[in-house]
Amino acid sequence: MNSRLLTWMLREIRSLRHRAWVIIGALALGVAAMTAVHALADSVRHGIHLEARPMIAADVVVRSMHPFPDELLAIEAQDRSQTKEMLSMVGTQDGRSLLAELKAVAGSYPLYGALKTDPNQPLEDLLTSEQVLVQPSLLRKLELKVGGEIRINGQTFKIAGQVLDEPDRMNIAMSAGPRILLSMEALERSKLEQFGSRVTRKVQFKSDENKLAELEQKLNVIQDNYSELRIQGASKGIPSASRGVGNVERFLSLVALLSMMVGVIGIVQSIQAWLRERCTVIATYRCLGVSHSELLLLFGGAVLCLAVLGSLIGIALSYLGLMSLFSLLSPYLPIEVSPQVSLNIGFQGLGLGLLSAGLAALYPLRKNLYVSPLAALRSDVEPKPLSLMERIFWGGLTLLLIGLLAVWQANDLTIGLVFLAVAGGIGLVLLGAGYAVANLLGHIKTKWWVLRHAFASFKRPGMAITGAMVALGLGVMVTLTISLLQLRLQDQLGSVHPERAPTAFFIDIQTDQKQGAQELFVKNKARHLQKAPVVMGRLSMINGVSVSERFKDSDEANRWAYSREQRLTFGAEIDPQDVVSGAWQSKPQDNELCLEQRYAERLGLTVGDSVRFDVQGIPLDFQVSAIRTISWESFNINFFVVGEAGMLKDAPQFQLAAAQFDLEDEEALQAQLIQKYPNITMVSVRSILEKSMGMLASLSEAIQGVGIFSALAGILILIGTLQTSTIQRSKQVALLRTLGATAREIISLFAIEFAVLGVVAGGIGALAAYLLSDLIFRQGFGIEPALHWSLLPAWIGMTALITVFTGLWACQRPLSQSPWEVIRGD
């Protein structure tokens, strides 16, 4: 580019004036949202990758509730460790006792991460057959000190120190009691591990990087023969966490991209208005011999310069947004995550801003740069209109670029194309609605000339009403979709019912203990008490095919559904509204089952299929008669499998209970249960409930912030759109004033026009938002939408008010100019 073109480009950038800030602002907001979403997901993924090995304290972990087969223990590895975990009553010499979680370790535990103890000494020196480590909470509850003694199953052990942190245990894990760390020799001495004892066994493997794949392959071969084994590898990170981060990133990226596309519409309108104002200047350039390619370089370069500035501002803003998100969410993340905006993500943001600006400039540049030099002498010469084939070509190219952007951001071809189809379909509906409304209003007859002129403006050439309707409607759709998402999240938050959610669960209440346990619950002021019978069973056959056969062909993520020991209940009331397939009668047949929807999907079960559960060695055959959804976030007692009492009431069973207590009553109840019913396990979920509520509240605030961003982007879009018709509105105002119209009448005319625009665009955009939200909730999240239809009129009215005030503000210049200035062209 020569110095002459560079000088002209700087002059054209200055000619943009306030429109430059619309372009910069729209790009900055869009790039900030996109970059912040990707940076947040990248930071969390990076944290998961770094913490994957410490979180499982190994390269590969194998879990089982049964003793490990010899071929598993014979596998060679660089290093290994073993752990056994169980629950047991522990006490003091003077009779005080409580339920504790015991963890026996052997080998080089932990293989990764750091076990924090006090004193900070090697584990082999602290753990012997006579010594254990305990959590500080156990010392407080039993009023013991380091160096004191504790009794486990009648055996006395010395407390050698405190265990402060275990790398393979998250700080939000459910806890049945304080933790005790001991050696395998101490566990053997306690004689707790007997036939029938409920013990969770783990073998942790450490491997050379180049032999890790071979180790995992050997373990998978063994797992095919022993379905009760569960394998987790650090090389895959934390699969469920990674999938969750990916899903959230994909959804937020598409929402941010949709906001960016709405911003692009505003940029298109601003560039269009700018180029129309520069029509005479462009014609002058043509008189001076400037070619079309040089004009494209001149005006396109001006837009790209603003795009670079807007993108850089957006990247800077994204870091501030990222820090805000981390301040909200970091207290609730189970791993340590540090915010970071990598150069790669920064370049992606810059590229996205430049592509969006280029996308926005394509059509206006092509439409307005082909101006006849004659326009320098005559103001009524318009740019050469595009032919039908040219409009199809440029429209197709624009859709292709939007589709590529959608696929890039979603990282999925199908989702990207669906996004393009939905956004394009809504745009076409708004476009059609604009023409329909214009034709409809044109046929309305009224005596008041202000109203008549307001309606006529919808068909007047150059007023950009149709473009404004599309831009405003899409802006309303994006903003309202995010708001509906936030409201649904608040509904989810409310459905947890913190005032009703249980703070403790009680497991293994025997039949002859029900009455006594009930009395203790009432004595300690239990609130919202829930109870359910539980029968333990293991799935053995599906539709006549053994589970072991189906297990081999199943996905790794679904194998737990086949191998885990399942809790069955009976007599539970099922809300017919929760049943999504089949029917659950008030008095079902003896062999009928109702399954939870996702559990049934993992097993590939539908209504009418047959299943067999082994209960204490006795096979029981059932038929699936209903499939239902469950609101797990309510923290209430729920089951994957619900049967009828006829088949299960005589099976060996225990009772599960849950209730809400004050902290002091909960601690007193635990002590009483230990004394009277030591077999009953009390599991406190108070900390999990508090953390979950805090995280959901922070997510709600984060989504609200995205909603505010979308609202700001929408206002910028509206301003940019309405500025397109500044010249036409100036001529309209000048003509009306010359004919004797007062300023009040002109303002009323514009207000009516903007109000109708806001009502129509707001109505269509709001309906599109409800439909899009329904699709997102059902297909994306698998939850019922529960849309707030009562807010629809309020949204339409608010859109109309914002459109009126923003439109009048954007029309200050036409309203303030004198007719003589417009006529002279000053």
Image (cartoon, rainbow, N blue to C red):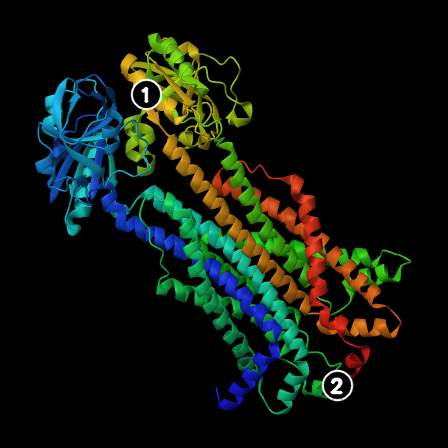
Quadrant for the C terminus in the image: bottom right
Q: Is residue 699 visible?
A: yes
* Distance Cα–Cα, label 1 vs label 2: 92 Å
Question: Closer to us: mark 1 or mark 2?
Answer: 1
Q: On the rendered structure, is 119 left or right of 563? A: left
Instruction: Reply above or below: 227 against 355.
Output: above
For the point 37% across and 24% down, the residue is: 664
Instruction: Reply above or below: 338 against 150.
Output: below
Instruction: Reply above or below: 167 against 156.
Output: below
Residue located farthest toward the right when viewing the structure as drawn: 447
Give whichever of discs 1 and 2 has the lower sequence position: 2
Task: State the mark number for residue 584.
Answer: none
Asked which quadrant contains residue 449, the reply is bottom right
Residue 131 in the image: state x and y as whole percent.
11, 29
Mark 2 neighbour class, 10 Å CA radius: few under 14, some 14 to 19, many 20 or more: few
For the point 54% across and 44% down, the residue is: 485
Q: Which residue is mark 1?
A: 670
Q: On the rendered structure, is 351 left or right of 476? A: left
Q: Which residue is mark 2?
A: 378
Q: On the rendered structure, is 592 left or right of 808? A: left
For the point 51% across and 32% down, the residue is: 495
Residue type at numbered disc 2 = Arg
